[in-house]
Image (cartoon, helix red, strand yellow):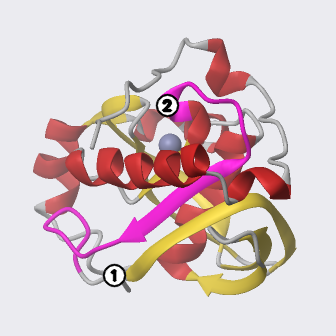
Amino acid sequence: MTRLPRSYFGDPVLRARAKTVANRDIGTRSFQRLMQEMFFTMRRVGGVGLAAPQIGKSIQLAVIEIRTTVLRPGIVPLAPTVIINPVIVSHSKEQVVDWEGCLSFPNARGLVPRYKEIAVAYFDRHGKKQTAHVQGFQARVFQHEIDHLNGTVYVDRMMDMKSLMTLGEFKKRVLKRGALRSK
Ligand code: ZN
């Protein structure tokens, strides 16, 4: 399995609206392989989500898998999920502010408001239409990945750039204080 080369902020691919995936393409060997390689790449770098523009492909595809780690204590895990051509069909009025990072912005964290709950329509890895109702951290990850497919990155959503910090400062100042655990 190949670890895919990643794109970083500054690369215009992260700012483009990704192209819709044709349903007939989902079942092809190359597309199935791409999804597997995206999961492989995401796991190798410890991410919870990876959108196709982040590996230089401007298509409406993202993979999500949430596991509890030392950086993400007390979250609800999510089994490997592929979202293709996702659309947020409804969302709560309420937003929650919490810490986010991104594989395209190495070693940084910032506070981002996100809808607490959303309903998302998408096609799965078999090309079957699905609707998911997610909340909390899962809803945050879905919104972060769907943003990537529309050329938006988390720093665009930050309300106060003063919360932007390096991962080292985040571990020292936020994780140690247990600020994440209280959410
Ligand atoms: Zn990201």
Indicate the secondary structure of the residue bearing disc 2: helix
Q: CA distance from mark 2 to mark 1?
A: 26 Å
Judged from this view, the residue extending furthest toward the front is 29
The verdict on residue 40 being magenta is no
Left or right? Give the position of 86 relative to 62.
right
Q: Earlier in the sequence, mark 2 or mark 1?
A: 2
- Where's the N terminus, which quadrant? top left
Left or right? Give the position of 4 relative to 20.
left
Q: Which residues are magenta?
A: 54-73
The residue wearing badge 1 is 75
Left or right? Give the position of 92 relative to 165.
right
Name the spot of residue 118 as percent of width and height, x first: 74, 78
110 up-or-down from 124: above or below:
above
- Where's the C terminus, which quadrant? bottom left
Please identify the dominant SS of the magenta region.
loop
Type of amino acid at the residue the image marks with label 2: Ile
* Residue 67 in view (yes/no): yes
Type of amino acid at the residue the image marks with label 1: Ile
* 10 Å crowding of disc 1: few (<14), some (14-19), many (20+): some
